[in-house]
Amino acid sequence: MTEVADPRPVAPRWGAVGWSIVVAAFLIGFYNYPWRTVGWRFDHLPGDVVDNRLNLAVLEHGYLYLTGKVDHFWDIGTYYPIRGVTAWSDAHLGMLPLYSALRAIGMPPERAFQGWFLIPFLLNFAAAAWAARRLGLGAVGAAITGYIFAYGLPIVAQTGHAQLVPRFLVPLAVVFAWEWLRAPRSTWRFAALCACLVYQTYISVYIGYFLGLLLATSLLAALILSRGRLPWRDLVLANWRVWSARVVVMALAVMALWPLAYAHTSNGSELPKDHVRLYAPRPMSWITPPGMTAAFPEIAQYTKLGSAMEGAGTEHQLSPGNLSLFGLAVGLLVTPYMLIRGRAFGGPASVVGIMSIAAVGVALLTTKFGENGETWYYGHIVVLPGASGIRAIGRIALILTFPAGLAIGAFFDLIARCAERFSRPAAVGVAIVALGAVATDQWLTPTSGQRKNDWWWARTSLPEAVKRRERVAEAIRSRPNATIVYAFPSVADKLGQQGPAGLQLDVMRGSQDCGVRTVNGWSGRAPNQWEFFPDYRSLMKWLIDTTHVSPDQLEGLIVIGEPAKDPDPAFDAQMRAKYPPVLIE
């Protein structure tokens, strides 16, 4: 079969009205979620006091490395004396240039973090809308696809993990993959596909891994549905020049990913397989929205997955919205039509059918079935080297918002085109109703009033975070010879924190400001035998007995806060004399 001349479906022109619909969709979604998260006055940080501020600490560490203020990127200086801790979580290499640029123009860390959080929503929306248009959808379909991909409920459920927000290379990769399948001799499209996959992995290992799963499943679906209508001969039996170019592209992609993969695997990023199973979704997870903020929390109450389950919390709140699920169902119904009507293959209907099947297939693959989750097909993959480093496999819902948005977008786009045959105002009316329905399905509850406290996990006060960080830094600077710092859990109450976990981030950020290492820490996992050491004895046992730090290396150690009393008064007095605590009132 000969290769198609141009693999791109012809999309209708948008015009002023079409552009207005797309821009309106972006602004409505931006108001509904990210802007309300940071606050009208930009006085909040996204996420709670723990995980998202870990993102800020890693980003700031990267900026300090780029500006020559720290020597080793993969050693963030926490959990002293453990090294390589940067690799235990997302290293943010892909989005570090954006954060660093905001810091370079004079923004303080917290303000730069706000920009780092907000700007990807524009990139996500623009990428999804562009991809929808490139795949043949009109303005209505592009607006809805962009809305669900950029602002969908699975993203809201992961507000505490803002490193998962930047996913703008997912739609681009799908477009290049589809166009390359229809024109396999166009090596530049294959190169663009690989580049998207590599850079998305550098942005977030999670999203890059999930994108690979989605593309592999989509390829299998295309193979089944094409029935010879794709140029498989050009794909498989291409000449040596084409195959040589493909091999070079794949080799370059592997070489580009190797440093990142090596850093994570060599520093022990993998977790036990049972830990991954714990976070795997259940069937009801796919219809459960974020129970504390979704406009229809009754669904989460019905599935009993609204708050926490098996310790996994929001990892089970994966619903892309009721209309998105309806769109995927319609997308699955497109498949028989494609099989019967060969002429339909190649247009938007074929893409919707393939992506819908791929999305459902990936969801079935990662879901655990049975009362105790004993049936879990993904268990055959998680045993592969490196796979267990992706502990929360249900987060794949974040990229399934693109197939879901594409499916419901194509549905409403078809209705709008039919209405346009009668009159332009009718088509505009359909567009308004469609966008209103999608926005309502994805709407969130207020950040003020009766349900204000429901947002505690979605945002934290910026002024309070800055104040706590500065108080810790002030305590460290009170001892000019400090090289290592540890804050006892008792300090959390003095700083108004929510327990010792939040304290770790205050100490991490304060120690960064002072250029010292800290025994405190927070990451995707903790070192062996590390804990919230309440007293001198447990702290010294960790430093000397467990990690074998020599006494001379502890000359610059300062401790912050009042330690718990030791059963041996003499030992307690000796430690207080050598490492007198710095108290924060």
Image (cartoon, rainbow, N blue to C red):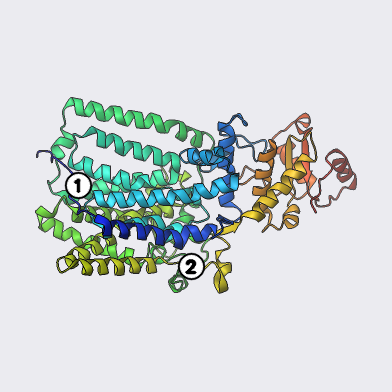
The quarter of the picture where residue 289 lies is bottom left
Circle 2: residue type? Gly
Mark 2: give few (<14), some (14-19) or many (20+) Cα within 10 Å.
Answer: many
In percent of width and height, residue 288 lies at 42, 66
* Residue at position x 81%, y 51% in the image: 562
In percent of width and height, residue 282 lies at 41, 62
For residue 385, above or below residue 313: above
In percent of width and height, residue 157 lies at 47, 60
Quadrant in which the C terminus appears: bottom right
- Horizontal relation, residue 304 to residue 10: left or right: right
* Residue at position x 75%, y 44% in the image: 474
* Residue at position x 43%, y 47% in the image: 166
- In the displayed orientation, state which residue is furthest to the front: 16
Circle 1: residue type? Leu
* The one of 89 and 514 positioned closer to us in this rendering: 514
Instruction: From the image, tell me which residue sits under label 1.
Output: 223
In percent of width and height, residue 351 lies at 22, 52
Circles 2 and 1: CB atoms closer than 8 Å: no
Q: Secondary structure at mark 2?
A: loop
Quadrant in which the N terminus appears: top left
Mark 1: give few (<14), some (14-19) or many (20+) Cα within 10 Å.
Answer: some
For residue 166, above or below residue 242: below
Instruction: From the image, tell me which residue sits under label 2.
Output: 291
The quarter of the picture where residue 553 lies is top right
What's the distance in space between the residues labelled 2 and 1, CA to CA? Answer: 38 Å
* The one of 38 and 91 positioned closer to us in this rendering: 38
